[in-house]
Image: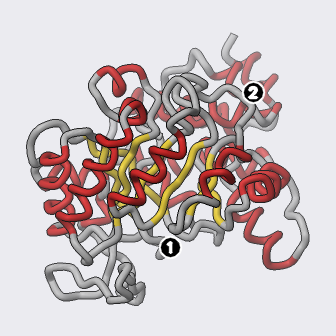
Amino acid sequence: MEGVIDAHCRDLLTREAGFDWTVTEFVRVVDARLPPRVFYKHCPELLHKNCPELLHKNRSGLLHKNRSGLLNPPATPSGIPVHLQLLGSDPDALAANAHQALRLGAISLDLNFGCPAKLVNRHDGGASMLRDPERLYRAVDAVQSAVGDHIPVTAKIRLGFSDRRLALACAQAAEAGGAAQLVVHARTRNEGYRPPAHWEWIGRIRTRLSIPVVANGDIWSLEDYWKARTLSGCRDVMLGRGALADPWLAPRIRHWQLTGHRLPPTSWPQRASLLSAYAAMQRNTLPDKVVVSLLKQWLNHMRARNPEAAQRFQALRRITDLDTFLDGLNQPTPSAIAVGQS
């Protein structure tokens, strides 16, 4: 979710109960230890640890204290823990940056072996590692050795690169390297985001591992959530694009878990209010045209699953002025926007 799930987005998505933890955009690791400012850029929650009452237990059951000695892990303003994600292939560089992240107060390190982006894969990152389980093992092992029992190391994979023949081998390599949990996106790299998601394949992996496995991919609705859990046998799921398409999906799932009842569909005023709040947060530090671009990116995620969002996107897609764009989001009907901008 590079370029989408930043700290402001994490803040907004976790204001309603639903998420148990969040993961940052990936920190790209190449061949050197990165300076603290890079980690703070991707995870500003490291600078503003909001919840002293949150206690994080590592795999040994011990409470993790940061270097200041305070039990205050990085979290969103609502108190949802934020885990730091690394992406890379060089074990030594990953280990050096894992140690840096630990020193800066990270409470968990997630390793991204699932990114399907061509540019990332051409530079030997993300899903490209799924072509060689041994290399994946060495990467996880190096990071786990670097942080020891201080914080857990987790990983995310897909069902392979071009096919699924190495799916189980890659999952087992992550576990053998020391991953405490594995998220599996239910498609290969070459399948990208094309439906369907093969949740049943996650189930095949889950039954062969002793660590928790989390299902991911194509969870857009309450029905998808239940189907993904049923076919994979996983207790937990991870939301990515689905949480952007419907920012109330996680609260919808949590409400159903607790009550057995459905929340009403997310209304357009709810969506417009959230996008407006996002813009207000971003424009404090970014140029207006960049904020408009970010809003269009989020609205683009919404439009595939919501007819009114699709109409708004079509009406606003050529707007570059932020205030005009926000007015368009909050006008009563998309048709009024189209007329006003003609």
* Residue 157 percent across, percent down from the top left: 48, 44
- State the separation of the CA atoms marked 1 and 2: 30 Å
Q: Amino acid at mark 2?
A: Ala
Give the amino acid type for the residue marked by disc 1 in the picture: Ser
> Residue 188: percent from the left, percent from the top?
57, 31
Residue in the picture at 36% in, 76% down: 50
| Identity of the residue furthest to the right in this view | 261
Q: Is residue 315 left or right of residue 37?
A: right
Q: Residues within 10 Å of mark 2 (few under 14, many from 20)?
A: some
Q: Secondary structure at mark 2?
A: helix
Residue shown at 51%/48% (left/top)?
A: 278
Q: Quadrant of residue 128?
A: top left
**Residue 39, above or below 26:** below
The crowd level at tag 1 (other Cα within 10 Å; few <14, some 14-19, many 20+) is some
State the mark number for residue 310: 2
Compared with 326, 118 (above or below) is above
Q: Nearer the viewer, residue 108 or 71?
A: 108
Nearer to us in this view, 124 or 193: 124
| On screen, residue 256 above or below 42 | below
Q: Secondary structure at mark 1?
A: loop
Q: Give the label on residue 78, or none.
A: 1
Q: Is residue 337 visible?
A: yes
Q: Report x, y in % for residue 138.
A: 26, 49
Percent across and percent down for residue 283 are 39, 43
Q: Quadrant of residue 310?
A: top right
